[in-house]
Image (spheres, grey):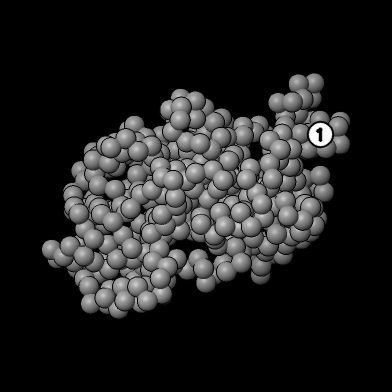
Amino acid sequence: MIKPHGSNELNPLFVADAAKNLALATEAESLPSLLVSSAAAANAVMLGAGYFNPLTGYMNLADSLSVAENLHTVDGLFWPVPIVNLSNDISAIGDAKRIALRDPNVDGNPVLAIMDIEAIEEVSAEQIDFMAENIFGNLDENHPGVAAFKGQGNTLLSGPIQVLNYSYFQKDFPDTFRTAYEIRNEMADRGWNKVVAFQTRNPMHRAHEELCRMAQEDLQTDGILIHMLLGKLKAGDIPADVRDDCIRTMVDIYFPENTVMVTGYGFDMLYAGPREAVLHAVFRQNCGCTHLIVGRDHAGVGDYYGGFDAQTIFDEKVPAGSLEIEIYRADHTAYSKKLDKVIMMKDAPDHEKDDFILLSGTKVREMLGNGIAPPPEFSRPECAKILMDYYQTLDS
């Protein structure tokens, strides 16, 4: 199986030993505590689950600035986005060096992790902007990622952490949330060595389904990992439980047995386009995938990124040998009326726009909200029914 990024073995930061976990949880109740941002909590979950291997905790300012500018830490570890714990108020922890990190996304704000503080640094507004512009490619505060990043605060706490739980993800998504090492173990049990990952934050329509098939056939992989984001999204995105239902229904009906794993990970969407695509590649390598499908406007939002920026970044900013995982470059896929199947549009130079069944996201949402199923060439009827039921609950 492919090695994790930056080490020979996966080193998740979750404390799996029950006795040690309980001892730390007991200790945490007597420690000064900090209520962290949702982004910092999501970073802790990803560190705990092994997705952010080989990091041992939150980055300091020097590493954060280096990663933002050059995609590597001061010591040279390739990494695409700063993994930080920014706060706007640390008065509760005084001068403590060991603190409990409390979860903002769970009622009662239980302890999520214990942190050993190596440094507390003030980050200037210019440095925040420098990082944001490098990560997101802009400083437009209407960009959801820019707004979230700049809204966390200007005090940076760095140091190693020990993770005690996976926030709300295990409880809310018991059938779907999986850690990187759980996915690796399941791949080993299935006898999979060559695996292509598909990233999604949306329900999958026919084009996505066929894209997974194309990638599996072209690459001759043992299986497909459909890996969905379960964390915070922007307003208007489909909730994770509805997406999960759609995707599982599609896989159960339309894919052969033991060819697809449907899992999810606990993270807040960054909407960082190209940089986030590279992060997706890093943590798919950590969970055992040899390939990642990168399509048009991967991890994008609005019109902030070019259609293929998330592919060209691998040529322009990812040095050879930085990652073992490879990307599968996908164009826009759509149903061809001429050929009676889903194809990549670049493979049909003889087609006009009217030769494809193309529906905008706005049009699809409007149809579903009115109880009208999109054409079966666009969306499987079983999945359309789940989405129609969801949209109609919004109007009731």
Residue at figure coordinates x 66%, y 52% from the top left: 191
Looking at the rendered image, the quarter that the C terminus falls into is bottom right
> Compared with residue 284, is residue 324 higher up or lower down, i.e. above or below?
above
Type of amino acid under label 1: Ser
Name the residue carrying label 1: 336
Residue at figure coordinates x 38%, y 59% from the top left: 13
Residue at figure coordinates x 79%, y 30% from the top left: 354
Extreme residue toward the top, this view: 350
Q: Nearer the viewer, residue 389 or 110?
A: 110
Residue 353's spot in the image, x, y percent?
A: 76, 28
> Compared with residue 323, is residue 158 higher up or lower down, i.e. above or below?
below
Whether residue 372 can be seen here? no
Q: Dot 1: what SS?
A: strand
Residue at figure coordinates x 42%, y 57% from the top left: 12
- Relative to 31, 375 lies left or right: right
- Relative to 30, 208 lies left or right: right
Whether residue 45 can be seen here? yes
Residue 160's spot in the image, x, y percent?
A: 28, 56
Looking at the rendered image, the quarter that the N terminus falls into is top right
Residue 394's spot in the image, x, y percent?
A: 63, 65
Q: Quadrant of residue 164?
A: bottom left
